[in-house]
Amino acid sequence: MAIRFGTVTPMLPAGPCLLEALDFYIHGMGFRAIWQEGDMAGIERDGVAFHLVRNSEKTWADNASFSIGVNGLDALYVEYGSLPAKLGPLEMKSWGRREFHLIAPSGVCFQFYELG
């Protein structure tokens, strides 16, 4: 049988409190918890999944970034507008892609761009 990769589930540094991170990702960013055990939890939204890991090493979070393609970028920007996070402008970049970035309280950076 040939080897075939199926999915990637990045591990996100959640900061020192997993419960606070879960609250942010679930109630703020619209993910749902799929599992939780000890200092880890799995979250998912529309097929995009992450494993949150309680971690107090700020440099790990500050150096983690993820680019996520979405349909409905304008609506997502409005949805995320009141989050306790750093939200960059929604703009057309010089490379021809509309996008914005969000920096979570832990320091993890998400870049959202319009698909298609």
Image (cartoon, rainbow, N blue to C red):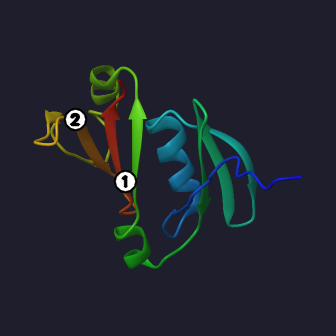
The x, y position of residue 87, in whole percent, is 23, 44
The x, y position of residue 67, in whole percent, is 38, 47
- For image coordinates 32% across by 20% down, the residue present is 75
Q: Quadrant of residue 68?
A: top left
Q: Residue furthest front?
A: 2
Q: Which residue is mark 2?
A: 97
Q: Is residue 88 left or right of residue 24?
A: left
Q: Is residue 71 above or below residue 32?
A: above
The x, y position of residue 15, in whole percent, is 48, 67
**In terms of secondary structure, where does tag 2 sit?**
loop
Between 81 and 12, which is closer to the camera in this rendering?
Answer: 12
Disc 2 marks which amino acid?
Arg
Q: Is residue 101 above or below residue 81?
A: below
Q: Which residue is mark 1?
A: 104
Between 101 and 81, which is closer to the camera in this rendering?
Answer: 101
Between 26 and 51, which is closer to the camera in this rendering?
Answer: 51
Q: Earlier in the sequence, mark 1 or mark 2?
A: 2
Q: Quadrant of residue 78?
A: top left
Q: Is residue 19 left or right of residue 24?
A: right
